Image: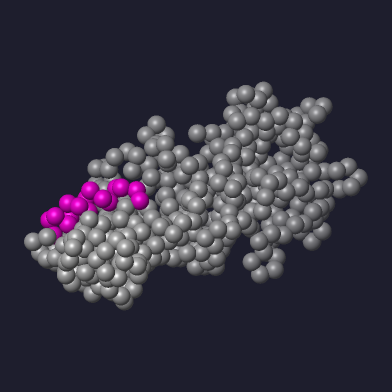
Amino acid sequence: MIATTVAAALSSLALVAQDATPLRASPSDSAPAQAQLWQGDALEVRGERLGYLQVWDHKRERGGYVRTSQVRGTDAKEADAPELLAVLRFVKDTAGSEALGIAYAAAYLKAAPARDIGPEPFDAIGTMAERLARRASSRNTTPNTTLSAHLDGVGAYGVRWVNFERDGAVQLCYDGEAYGRVLAMPQATPEQQARAVLGLTRHDCVDPGLKPTEREARDKWRAEVLDKLSPNAMTTLPEWTKNKLRLRRAGVWSSLAFAQARRGEAAQAAGQRAMDELAGVRAAELAEEDLAEYNDAAIRVGASRWAAAPAPIGRPDITRRPTLITQAGESGETCLLLVDAQHDAKQPLLRRCTWGVVWLNSATVDPGATLLTVAVQPLATWRELWVLRKDGAQGWALDVLPPAPGNPLGADAGYIEYAGFAPGAEPKLLLAREARTEGRWSRRFEVAKLPTLTTDKFASTPQILAAFQKFQDAEWKRGTVSIR
């Protein structure tokens, strides 16, 4: 762990302050370079000569000379602790200096007596390690030697990474050990606790390869971590930090609601918690960099929002119009059946099975009983709309409308929902879509022609569309998160 590794790694030392510092064979600029050193590397000092320090590099197991101006020396003794902490405070928020900052944190942890060590150095280590991992995983970052060296170098201080493939790229995440130490310290401030909680519960640091039971266990753990901040601690936080916590909670609880519903358990409490957390966000107090997470949370909550709605009560009335019912299929499957007074579950008008959650409480039927819609959620962050249409002599047909083009088993997320029905000579279906595709967020409201389901008109807000002004469904407007 960090404290143990630090004690073993550091003695009387020099910390490399400049990247690509040469470790030379002798104290001369013309001497051959035996290795390149990087910011944050720790060297044991064994002497000084001609403006150079004679050092031993334990990581590379070789000695040499470095210019005194390119390193920062310290004995890492108790008397040095205040100065080391001061430098750490200065460096920790400087982008690009994470490796050096972690080295100073390690030196401080070695120098300071145990009684004086609080959450601050661990908070700094977690913050810098997470920032370094984010930069390494960014699609806008070109792989380079310096970044790779920094990632490798901080490993000498006990910083560990986890990585997995996401959407064809490698996602690198800090394992969160320093954040865990912060949460274990009763003297941690609410701000430090909030940073730790957010660092430990990132959506993009959940392995997409987890099995459903493993994913649910992970989400339960994340929900517990997010609730570690007491209500009193929450009141002292700035509003933008509260928003971050609410957004993260909304996403986690929406995932739990889906998992519970998928196992046939009551999911209304989890679904309502997700809706409440999203509703508690003060949009006016959102930081600009949090807008993407706000939209992401809305998509997650929108996908599972039917979990918060009451389940259908009693037996469906099939005496006058077609009705949707479900029955168990093969192991884990749910089969959707369209029945009426003449066609029961043994001989339904239409039957389709799915591994997803069929939200029967979302089912709608048009006044002429020739069009039915129902929400089906195959993934925690993906909800489709199944449209069942009576096609004259051909009987009933089913179309599956996805939130956006693309493969739902990839990194994309979204939902699509019924928003109303416009009758007339050319009847139309009102739809609302919100999705994230290849990192880009989109939301639009559509008027689709029947029976082809092709888009006639669309807009970024429903107020622009006359059909929405006249025919939007009141229940949809009350429950949707697409209008916010």
Q: What residue lies at 47% left-to-right and 64% top-to-bottom?
A: 163
- Residue 440, percent from left and from top: 57, 43
Q: Which residues are magenta?
A: 81-96
On whether residue 95 falls in the magenta region, the answer is yes
Q: Residue furthest bottom?
A: 61
Q: Using the image as rendered, state which of residue 153 and residue 169 is in the foreground.
A: 153
In the visual, does 222 lie left or right of 76?
Answer: right
Residue pictured at 57% horizontal, 45% vertical: 436
Q: Nearer the viewer, residue 266 or 36?
A: 36
Q: Quadrant of the N terminus?
A: bottom left
Res 475 seen here: no
Residue 395 rendering spot, x and y as whole percentages? 86, 48
Observer-nearest of 356 and 194 = 194
**Would you identify the image quadrant in which residue 120 lies?**
bottom left
Position of 474 with respect to 369 (left or right) is: left
Main SS of the magenta segment?
helix
Work out which residue is located at the far right of the displayed protein and give it. Answer: 393
Question: Which of the colour schemes (rainbow, by chain, secondary structure, one colour) is used?
Answer: one colour
The number of numbered badges drawn on the structure is 0
**Residue 68 appears in view:** yes
Is 293 covered by the magenta stretch?
no
Q: Residue furthest left?
A: 79
Residue 131, horizontal then vertical, whole percent: 37, 53
Quadrant in the picture for residue 29: bottom left
Residue 185 as seen in the image, left or right of residue 456: left
* Image position, residue 267 (x, y; %): 51, 55
Residue at 79%, 36% (x, y): give it.
Answer: 450
Which residue is painted at 33% across and 43% down in the image?
A: 241
Q: Quadrant of residue 336?
A: bottom right
Q: Is residue 65 above or below residue 443?
A: below
